[in-house]
Image (tube, coloured by chain):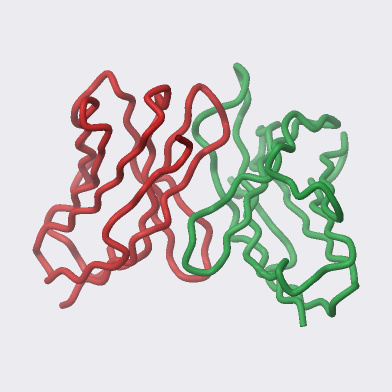
Amino acid sequence: NAGVMQNPRHLVRRRGQEARLRCSPMKGHSHVYWYRQLPEEGLKFMVYLQKENIIDESGMPKERFSAEFPKEGPSILRIQQVVRGDSAAYFCASSPGLAGPSYEQYFGPGTRLTVT
Amino acid sequence: QQQVKQSPQSLIVQKGGISIINCAYENTAFDYFPWYQQFPGKGPALLIAIRPDVSEKKEGRFTISFNKSAKQFSLHIMDSQPGDSATYFCAASKGHYQLIWGAGTKLIIKP
């Protein structure tokens, strides 16, 4: 049973380019969460999605960041016009969502974004 | 109110010793307190979790102690092994999916 998959694992972008991060949840999981981790810090919640719905994006920066979880395919976190401050590790987690959001979230290996 | 304060920032323990990591919170509405283990280059993995209706939970060598009145909880790793060397994060949430994370403790077990 494959875990949460994220790709790419490492992504280098120049300032002003776009970054697209992908997350495939665990099999049978319908809830996806994105977190950002700066060096030497804990994770910070960004957004919570279910299939075709953004449930909570209170942790997302208001500009340049967007997320989606289409009916088919992986969840995508998109960062437009990246800046150096966007350099971080971005983690995706999933949960079964059998009875609403689950406390137990399972994390992928992360995408390490470097903006040069 | 939303913060979870974790200490120490780093910890070195001899093999076979007890590793203790502490966390404190302010929001009394929090009702779920997990600990995650993260190895370099990997995502966090859920280690053990507790709800405030119990004061202690043990799974193998890992124990969470919870002090509701002091608003503190801690992770104890008994008989610490070199393979336990990792960064440990405490977190908290309230009936909610938004985990609030501590800053992490880098644990090194010396052989």
Is residue B110 rendered to the left or right of residue B42?
left
Q: Residue B54 appears at what percent x and percent y?
A: 23, 22
Residue displayed at 39% across by 55% down: B37
Number of marks drawn: 0
To which quarter of the image does residue A72 belong?
top right
Q: Camera-side residue: A61 or B73?
A: A61
Residue displayed at 15% across by 69% down: B13
Q: Residue A48 appears at what percent x and percent y?
A: 70, 36
Residue displayed at 61% across by 45% down: A45
Please tell me whether residue B72 is drawn above or below residue A16 in the rendered image: above
Which residue in the rendered view is the most extreme toward the left? B17
Q: Which chain is green?
A: A
Q: Camera-side residue: A18 or A23?
A: A18
Which residue in the rendered view is the most extreme toward the bottom? A116
Is residue B26 rendered to the left or right of residue A68?
left
Residue displayed at 25% across by 49% down: B22
* Chain B, chosen colour in render: red
Q: Residue A1 appears at what percent x and percent y?
A: 58, 45
- What is the quadrant of the C terminus of chain B in the image? bottom left
- What is the quadrant of the N terminus of chain B in the image? top left
Q: Camera-side residue: B33 or B14?
A: B33
Which residue in the rendered view is the most extreme toward the front? B1
To which quarter of the image does residue B20 belong?
bottom left
Please tell me whether residue A90 is drawn above or below residue B31 in the rendered image: below
